């Protein structure tokens, strides 16, 4: 009997397994079918705020012919159960022409579709924005969204959990008179309106935000705008910014309604009174059109990261207590008492301005005797694996460079949570006074010290200290402002300065930037934009870009470089699985000049304009390699501003950004392709072991304004062939 029961149960389990597998297969086929549809239906739940607004809408009004006025809200039927349906049409499926009015699908002609009935929607996914300005501070905003859509309404329902969006276009008032706009959203939103179709002349008319009354000097703006005079058949640019963070996806929404002249309630803006800013989908490979569209997308002041636009608080109150950024440290009066009234204790010069000045370094340095430079910490020996990262040296700086101004996140070591250490003012005064006194002895009354822009110190406790002096002088005879930027050395127990043998930097050496890419189209374009910006701002013409591209399908790297302002570049095509070490080594092997610099770089960076100058100053052939330390922002972190304190940490154990002369690269052997061909992580640490083993020192410095942004790693290192 028990045997028969067991057989029946076994048959039952087999049937259940069979039906279960069939059920899963059917579900999978249905999901796949839905994803292939060119039109996606987005079910939008009405928030409590929206219900409150909608309940105030009057009953249907009709003209003499019985038609409902276009600008008034159509009354919902009782069966709708507070649910509206929007159709979101992807731009790649632009052939179909559809229109949606309260869930009803109706065809419209192509001409109407292009000119009326749509707005542009740009989405940035996987993005944390504690406030609207966090979207503006994101490096891919406003020109490189993850998704580009057309939508038939300004309003938006649930679109995800971590994202920012920009909804933009033109609105056409149906009658002339005073209009009032009302904005509701979860979490934060801003509505901007232009004077007619001019996108450069816009005004913030409504917003949903946390007011920062303690520190903001900006005019308060509420959910509801003031009365705004608009003319019938006028064309007015609008810009709606919206961010959504975290869970509660069902509450995600942003809705704009208006109160028309002589109206009694706020109503939706009909699609008939809307048109997009961009009329069609720009091909990613048509870079002339892409450039024109980028200019249009940047034109509005609503997208600019400014103190006025950053007036609000956000989620995380510690960020918005008013940040004092020590941009230029005011020196004590004892500097003036020694260097004279011509000395500028407030130092109005930054490194960007400093680099543009004419130089007198060689003439002045010829005064100082040369001295042997053999720091004790430089050891030409074999290092154990990963031992070398503990043998690198950080420089201290003067004046304060602001690298301490951040909130350290995570269980980090102390050095990850500290900025650059500071040289005392007394020590700087002593060194600079000794330096200028020697100049006066050789050239009496020829040079007057004007400003101390930057001093860096690397200490060898047993022997002495090396200083990088960056000073500004006024040449009396010609009344000309000139600069000095060079290394000096001071032995322990000595009052004299000398020039360290072999430690001098080359102003015009070529820097070869090495980059590896796989399916990171927007970030690759961002890299090209960053390199172009720096090149234009600094008139840099000694930088060469070498990109190794592993079959990227979302960008044509070579065409993007060709259409940029960059002139020196090379693209190496690779197929198959992504191998970082092999890609880097192959790129470096194409460099023919042994007296040029190899610079390993990354995509997801915000780079200071002085970056290449800093690299040259700290990379010395035969003596010194350089690994600038970047600040790694957290998921919600943004660069330091007067109202936003950066969240993250200094990546002191990261050596991925690395510069060295090609001749020295060949000496230590380059990347370890054999041991790290299929591994990710540790290849840079192992590289440092071998760099130190050939007798080079590795210089380290936390670089202000050098940020790494959080990003998704999807598709970056796909190992499929």
Image (cartoon, helix red, strand yellow):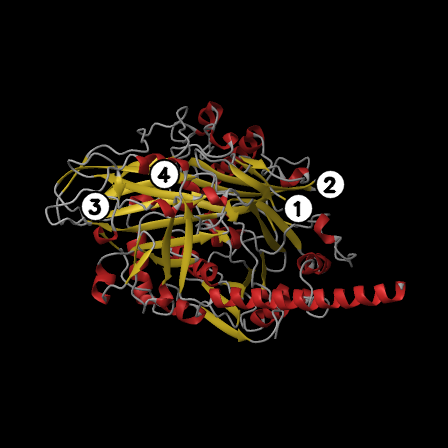
For the residues carrying marks 3 and 2, which lies nearer the camera in this image? 3
**Where in the figure is residue 633, as x and y percent of width and height?**
54, 45
**Which callout, 2 or 4, points at the residue further toward the start of the chain?**
4
Is 291 on the left or on the right of 525, as rendered? left
For the residues carrying marks 1 and 4, which lies nearer the camera in this image? 4
Q: Would you say the residues marked 3 and 2 are in contact, meaning their CB atoms lie under 8 Å apart?
A: no
Disc count in the image? 4
For the residues carrying marks 2 and 4, which lies nearer the camera in this image? 4
**Which callout, 3 or 2, points at the residue further toward the start of the chain?**
3
Q: Secondary structure at mark 2?
A: loop
* Residue identified by numbered label 1: 393
Q: Would you say the residues marked 2 and 4 are in contact, meaning their CB atoms lie under 8 Å apart?
A: no
What's the distance in space between the residues labelled 2 and 4, CA to CA? 72 Å
Q: Secondary structure at mark 1?
A: strand
The mark found on residue 50 in the picture is 4
What's the distance in space between the residues labelled 3 and 2, CA to CA? 81 Å
* Residue identified by numbered label 2: 462
Task: Establish if 635 lies above or below 555.
Answer: above
* Residue identified by numbered label 3: 71
Crowding at mark 2 (Cα within 10 Å: few <14, some 14-19, many 20+): few
**Where in the figure is residue 611, as x and y percent of width and height?**
48, 51
**Which callout, 2 or 1, points at the residue further toward the start of the chain?**
1
Task: Establish if 8 lies above or below 383.
Answer: below
What's the distance in space between the residues labelled 4 and 3, CA to CA? 17 Å
Farthest residue to the front: give it. 1
What's the distance in space between the residues labelled 1 and 4, CA to CA? 59 Å
């Amino acid at each position: 009997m028990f045997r028969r029961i067991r057989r029946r149960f076994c048959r039952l389990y087999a049937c259940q397994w069979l039906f279960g597998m069939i059920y899963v297969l059917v579900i999978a086929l249905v999901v796949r079918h839905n994803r292939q549809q060119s039109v996606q239906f987005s079910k939008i739940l009405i928030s409590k705020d929206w219900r409150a607004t909608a309940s105030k809408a009057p009953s249907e009004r009709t003209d003499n012919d019985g038609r409902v006025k276009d600008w008034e809200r159509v009354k919902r039927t009782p069966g709708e159960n507070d649910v509206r349906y929007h159709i979101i049409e992807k731009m790649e499926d632009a052939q179909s022409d559809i229109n949606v009015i309260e869930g009803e699908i109706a065809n419209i002609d192509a001409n109407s579709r292009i000119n009326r009935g749509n707005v542009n929607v740009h989405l940035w996914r996987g993005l944390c924005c504690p406030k609207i300005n966090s979207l503006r501070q994101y490096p891919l905003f406003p020109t490189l969204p993850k998704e580009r859509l057309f939508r038939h309404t300004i309003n938006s329902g649930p679109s995800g959990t971590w994202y920012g969006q920009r909804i933009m276009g033109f609105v056409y008032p149906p009658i002339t008179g005073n209009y009032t706009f009302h904005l509701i959203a979860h979490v934060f939103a801003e509505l901007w309106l232009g004077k007619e179709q001019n996108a450069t002349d816009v005004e913030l008319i409504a917003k949903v935000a946390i007011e920062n009354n303690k520190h903001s000097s900006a005019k308060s703006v509420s959910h509801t705008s003031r009365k705004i005079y608009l003319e019938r058949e006028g064309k007015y640019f609008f810009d709606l910014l919206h961010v959504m963070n975290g869970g509660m996806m069902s509450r995600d929404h942003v809705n704009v309604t208006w109160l028309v002249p002589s109206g009694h309630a706020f109503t939706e803006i009909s699609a008939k009174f809307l048109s997009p800013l961009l009329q069609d989908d720009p091909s990613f490979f048509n870079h002339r059109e892409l450039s024109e569209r980028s200019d249009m997308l940047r034109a509005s002041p609503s997208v600019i990261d400014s103190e006025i636009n950053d007036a609000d608080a956000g989620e995380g109150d510690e960020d918005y207590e008013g940040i004092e950024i020590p941009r230029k440290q005011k020196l004590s009066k004892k500097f003036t008492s020694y260097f004279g009234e011509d000395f500028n204790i407030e130092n109005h010069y930054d490194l960007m301005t400093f680099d543009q000045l004419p130089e007198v370094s060689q003439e002045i340095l010829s005064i100082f005797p040369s001295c042997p430079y053999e720091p004790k910490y430089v050891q030409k020996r074999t290092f154990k694996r990963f031992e070398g990262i503990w043998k690198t040296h950080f420089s201290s700086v003067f004046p304060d460079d602001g690298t301490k101004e951040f909130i350290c996140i995570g269980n980090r070591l102390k050095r990850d949570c500290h900025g650059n250490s500071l040289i005392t003012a007394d020590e700087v005064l002593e060194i600079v006074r000794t330096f200028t006194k020697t100049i006066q002895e050789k050239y009496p009354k020829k040079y007057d010290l004007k400003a101390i822009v930057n001093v860096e110190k690397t200490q060898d406790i047993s022997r002495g200290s090396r200083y990088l002096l960056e000073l500004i002088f006024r040449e009396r005879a010609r009344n000309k402002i000139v600069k000095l930027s060079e290394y000096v050395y001071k032995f322990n127990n000595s009052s004299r300065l000398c020039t360290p043998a072999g430690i001098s930097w080359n102003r015009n050496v070529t820097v070869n930037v090495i980059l590896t890419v796989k399916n990171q189209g927007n970030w690759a374009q961002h890299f090209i934009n960053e390199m172009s910006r720096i090149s234009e701002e600094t008139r840099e013409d000694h930088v060469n870009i070498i990109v190794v591209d592993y079959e990227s399908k979302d960008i044509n790297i070579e065409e993007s470089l060709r259409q940029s302002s960059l002139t020196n570049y090379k693209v190496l095509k690779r197929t198959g699985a992504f191998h970082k070490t092999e890609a880097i080594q192959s790129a470096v092997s194409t460099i023919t000049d042994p007296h040029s610099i190899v610079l390993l770089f990354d995509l997801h960076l915000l780079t200071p304009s002085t970056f290449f100058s800093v690299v040259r100053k700290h990379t010395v052939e035969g003596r010194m390699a350089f690994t600038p330390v970047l600040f790694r922002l957290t998921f919600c972190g943004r660069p330091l501003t007067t109202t936003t304190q950066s969240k993250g940490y200094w990546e002191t154990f990261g050596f991925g950004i690395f510069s060295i002369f090609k001749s020295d690269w060949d000496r230590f052997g380059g990347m370890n392709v054999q041991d790290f061909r299929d591994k990710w992580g540790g290849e840079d640490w192992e590289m440092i072991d071998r760099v130190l083993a050939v007798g080079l020192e590795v210089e380290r410095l936390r670089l202000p304004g050098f940020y790494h942004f959080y990003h998704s790693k999807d598709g970056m290192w796909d190992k499929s062939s």
